[in-house]
Image (cartoon, rainbow, N blue to C red):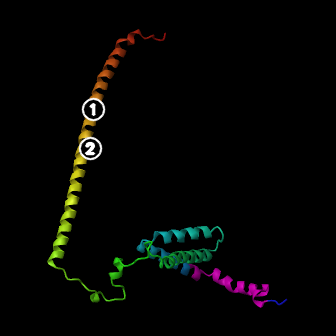
Amino acid sequence: MAKFPFFSTKALSKFSLKISPILKNRAVLYFLLLLAIIDSVVFATKGDNMSIAVLLLVGFLTTFFSKNMIVVLAIALCATHLFKYGIENAMEGFKEGADGDDEDNIMDDMPSADEDATEMEIPEMTGADTDEIINDAKATTDKLVASKESKVKDLEKELGDLQTSQKNILTGITELETFLNRAEGFMQKYEKYAKKPE
């Protein structure tokens, strides 16, 4: 049975001795801390809250297994980057639609980042095209105005209902006030008949 020199305990102990100073080095700790802060700022400016949450969550969970902050930060940074860029690469080939027909995809007509924007063809518009666009815009504004008017009518109706409810509440309060005045008068009238302690 042949022994592999790479997996012997002697080789592993030499390997751990070489890594041990790195795991206790302050410069490495501050470097990883700086990377974590820079990543957090970059994720925040891009609005990538999920990556920030993964960074914090993995860092928090790693503290249960290791008290060495270099290990915690390194694992959190690696896991966050694997999550972020691994998901992006996995979703890169994903296409919308069940048929796989991309003929009517609008983004195909757009120039890519590599192409020059001046090379993009701008279609010439005829009078009929502009009339059609103007008619579409008028129809859309008419629909919006009608929608706003119906909403205003609904609000006016609700306001009328609210005013009616307010009047009913005020009349109820005045009736309650007269009832309470009568009850108070009744109590004062019969107060003299109450038994007094001797």
Identify the residue shown where x is 21% and y is 55%. Answer: 146
Question: Where are the magenta residues, as a range?
Answer: 4-29
Where does residue 152 sit, x and y in percent of width and height? 22, 50
2 or 1: tag closer to the N-terminus: 2
- Front-lying residue, 26 or 116: 116
Where does residue 195 sit, x and y in percent of width and height? 45, 10
* Residue 150 higher or lower than 75, as above or below: above
Point out the residue furthest to the right here. Answer: 1
Amino acid type shown at disc 1: Asn
Identify the residue shown where x is 28% and y is 36%. Answer: 165
**Mark 2 residue crowding within 10 angstroms, few (<14) / some (14–19) / many (20+):** few
Q: Secondary structure at mark 1?
A: helix
Q: Which mark is residue 158?
A: 2
Dot 1 corresponds to which residue?
Answer: 168
Identify the residue shown where x is 26% and y is 39%. Answer: 161
Where does residue 22 sit, x and y in percent of width and height? 64, 83
Amino acid type shown at disc 2: Glu
